[in-house]
Amino acid sequence: MKIKYWSFILLLSGSFSCKKLTEVFPKTEEPTNTTNPNAEVNGWIYDTMKSYYLWENQLTAKASTDNKLLPADYFESLLIKPGELDRFSWIQEDVAELTASLQGVNKVVGIRFTPFFSNTAKTKVALSVAYALKGSPADKAGIKRGDFIVKVNGSELTPENYSAAFSSDNLKFTMGDYNGTEIIANAKTLDVVKAEVQTNPIQMDTIIVKGNKKIGYLVYLQFLSKFDTDMRNVFKEFKEKGVNELVLDLRYNGGGFISSSDILSSLIVKNLKPGTLMSKQEWNTELTKAYKTKYGNDVFDTKWLNESNNLGTLNRVFVLTSKATASASELVINNLKPYMDVVLIGDNTYGKNVGSVTLSDDKKRWKWGMQPIVLRTVNSLGQSEFGGKDGFIANFKVTDNAIPFRPFGDENETLLSVAIQQITGISASTANANARLKGTKKVDILNSAYPLDNPKHEIRDMFIDKLPSQK
């Protein structure tokens, strides 16, 4: 059974149990310490990490760990060089909530925004709406890309309070206008209540015709396997209408299923050859040895998929990027680089070339779910240079700080305009690309990669939900 059949997400969106994996690893010892209330769950955490953690050979000996710590603290104590080598492993108290978030289901208003200083004294903050998720409370309230929010529940936003402004479930937004100098409150208020929202990752798709260029444009927010058919249908329309250039907008895409990134890669790559090598995964030493012994030396290979709507003849693809472009998004870039020109426009990407898996207790003794890093990805040439904190370096560095944000697909939108200029052969420097258009203003941004509604909802990961033994 080959890796091409695995389901991956640059967030492990499935839930693994230890029992499912015992074809390769034997059952772990049952903890016997009954005097410490955390001993049993912490013992499970350690044994599971020892089996699957990418850096398991660097773990502290179990006897030297402090198993009296709370489970979340104990998990953190095991991580190897957290924030440096391992920047991504995490644990969550409720595995069901963890799994739902990886599937794009969250209790949210449904707004992604960019915070910026709204006055010259830099004492006030306004939120420029990057998008409202389709079908979300924000979308239903009429909030759209380019709108400004200046107050939440009557309070003016400041550098100190804006990040916590969405903590309540019931929110009243005071909207704002740009007066030529600052963003000021207007008379419009909107009442919005958080709700469970399923992310539709296809925020927008269109075809832009410029002379003999038919430019397919896709804004894709998260790699979610339940929307794979919809993604294929977008490319079916692109192919039927003769698209000969492609702009893939991943500036807000923090990752998702690796299986979905494999599909997207296979829809784009030039001269698709199904069954040939796309990429490889690297696991810890013991797991690699066990799986190769059981399933063969190519068990961790991912092959190009036979996608009938592959565009086929593209020599290049333009990808719009930011510091929020992570994991599965970066995997698509890395998959394509050996086969065609990949032109990055915007900011450097996040820098995440490792993937995780959801691990939960098969005996259901507790609800904890872990998302430890278990694999590293390389492309068909063995390259994986995007794992540092600089990520992939943008070919055209463009600061996305012109407000109000123009609609997706607008030919004058800050990042898309640069792609169109490159496609049509019109030379444009970064300065020209950022030139102020009438009615726009450049602002000082506080956080260019701010997540949906609240930082806890941000997903920057890729993960697997099935192993060869489960096929």
Image (cartoon, grey):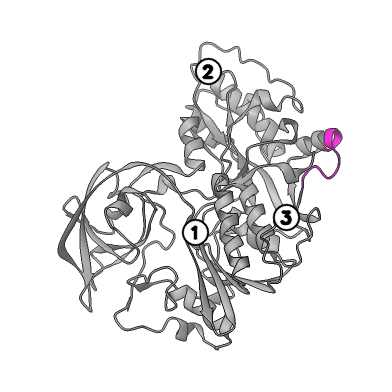
- Residue 374 at what x, y percent from top left? 66, 41
Q: Is residue 293 magenta?
A: yes
Secondary structure beneath label 3:
strand
Disc 3 or 2, which lies upstream in sequence?
A: 2
Q: Which of marks 3 and 1 is nearer the N terminus?
A: 1
Instruction: Answer whether residue 349 is magenta in the image.
Output: no
Disc on res. 378: 3
- State the separation of the CA atoms marked 2 and 1: 36 Å
Callout 3: few (<14), some (14-19), or many (20+) C-alpha neighbours within 10 Å? many
Tell me the distance, in whole angstroms, between the alpha carbons under discs 3 and 2.
Answer: 37 Å
- Quadrant of the rendering where the N terminus is positioned: top right
Q: Decide if residue 385 is in sight here.
A: no
Vertical arrangement, residue 275 with respect to residue 422, above or below: above
Type of amino acid at the residue the image marks with label 3: Val
Binning the other alpha carbons within 10 Å of mark 2 as few (below 14), some (14 to 19) or many (20 upward) gives: few
Instruction: Give the vertical position of 211 relative to 178 (above or below).
Output: below
Q: Give the range drawn in magenta.
A: 292-301
Gap between marks 3 and 1, in whole Å?
Answer: 21 Å
The amino acid beneath tag 2 is Arg
Report the side of 91 relative to 387 (left or right): left
Numbered label attached to residue 324:
1
Identify whether 363 is placed above or below 226: above
Residue 242 in the image, given as x and y percentages of width and height: 62, 72
Residue closest to the eye, 247 or 386: 247
Residue 32 visible here: yes
The answer to whether marks 3 and 1 mark residues whose Cβ atoms lie closer than 8 Å is: no
Q: At which x and y percent is residue 269?
A: 70, 64
